[in-house]
Amino acid sequence: MYSAKKIYNERHLQRGITSWPVKIIIPDIESCFKNDGPAEAEAKLFQRLSEDYDATTPKSVIDSRPWFGRCVYESSNDVCDDQIVTITWDDDPLPADSNLGLNTAAKRLQGRGAKTATFHMVAFTEKICERRGRIYGTAGEIEYDSHTIAVHDFVTEKTVTHRPEQRGGGHGGGDAGLAMQYVDAIQAVKTGRMSAAQAQRAYIGCSVEDVLRSHAVVFAAEEARREGRVVKWGEWWKRNVLEMDDSFEDDDYSLGEEYNAESCFEYEDDEVDMADDYNAERYFDDGDKDDGDRM
């Protein structure tokens, strides 16, 4: 069932699929398949899969490369193949600001109330490398997979299903999409239409600070898994980042117990003209949505 020959050859190469995951093993498999023929490409694949190591192989050689054809139960690969992570947030209100009218507690929350998220990563599924999820809110819920996004409104009791453009390629087209959005953000800054912080929010949907912290959360989750304990984010960040890098100052990152993105990048929504600078119709086709009014 988990035979390397079946996965890489029968399910992919024999069907003319020379992209991922076959090209991870043989980077030039596409040109080999096209110029030298399927038989030569298959022989090259099998030769690479047959490569192995034994007790006499130096550890430096073993650690220097992956061994795709080796039985996973006989290898030193101890990667986690089934993991559940639970993350909880307390209320995280924005700081009071008379200029923004955020003086009342309700206004300062702005969707930043207490939340709980459960993430389940499992290797053995029918849908390989596809993401599925459901988000529950007080006014509705969102369900998504790698092809559709369904938004249900508790008030209207209507569901609108969006079908984002599928461009193909790595991560369901996500790689190309991120690259395109990055280029658009650079262009917006170079032409003077936006500041860097505004372009990050409008085109990429996050800041560099968000990216840094989202990666850090993964390391914190791994620490919780390995040590079998609850990890407090504020304590983890201070111990692993602030105390290890003198360039970070507590005054610059007002963490408290939780992460406040606005403490790092301050911006005003009315400074970004989303209608002019970001066209959602590039990704959502109205013709494919279900009957009902758009939310």
Image (cartoon, grey):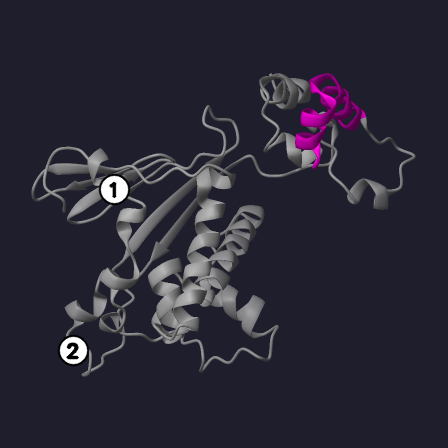
Q: How many marks?
A: 2
Q: Amino acid at mark 1?
A: Ile
Q: Main secondary structure of the magenta part?
A: helix
- Taking the image as shown, residue 42 lies to the left or right of residue 257, namely right
Residue 282's x, y, as percent?
A: 31, 48
Q: Residue at x 50, y 38 (%)?
A: 169
Taking 83 as reference, is 37 above or below it? above
Residue 144, image x and y in percent?
32, 38
Residue that carries the numbered disc 1 in the rendered image: 142
Camera-side residue of 149 and 14: 14
* Residue positioned most to the left: 156
Q: Residue at x 47, y 26 (%)?
A: 125
Which mark is drawn over residue 101? Answer: 2
Q: Is residue 256 visible?
A: no
Image quarter of residue 25: top right
Query: What segment is highlighted magenta in the picture?
Result: 27-50
Residue 38 among magenta residues: yes
**Quadrant of the image occupied by residue 95:** bottom left
For this orientation, the residue located farthest to the right is 56
Callout 2: few (<14), some (14-19), or many (20+) C-alpha neighbours within 10 Å? few
Q: Earlier in the sequence, mark 1 or mark 2?
A: 2
Rendered location of residue 263, percent (x, y)? 37, 75
Which amino acid, mark 2?
Gly
Q: Quadrant of the N terminus?
A: top right
Residue at the far front in the pictured view: 35
Quarter assignment of residue 266: bottom left
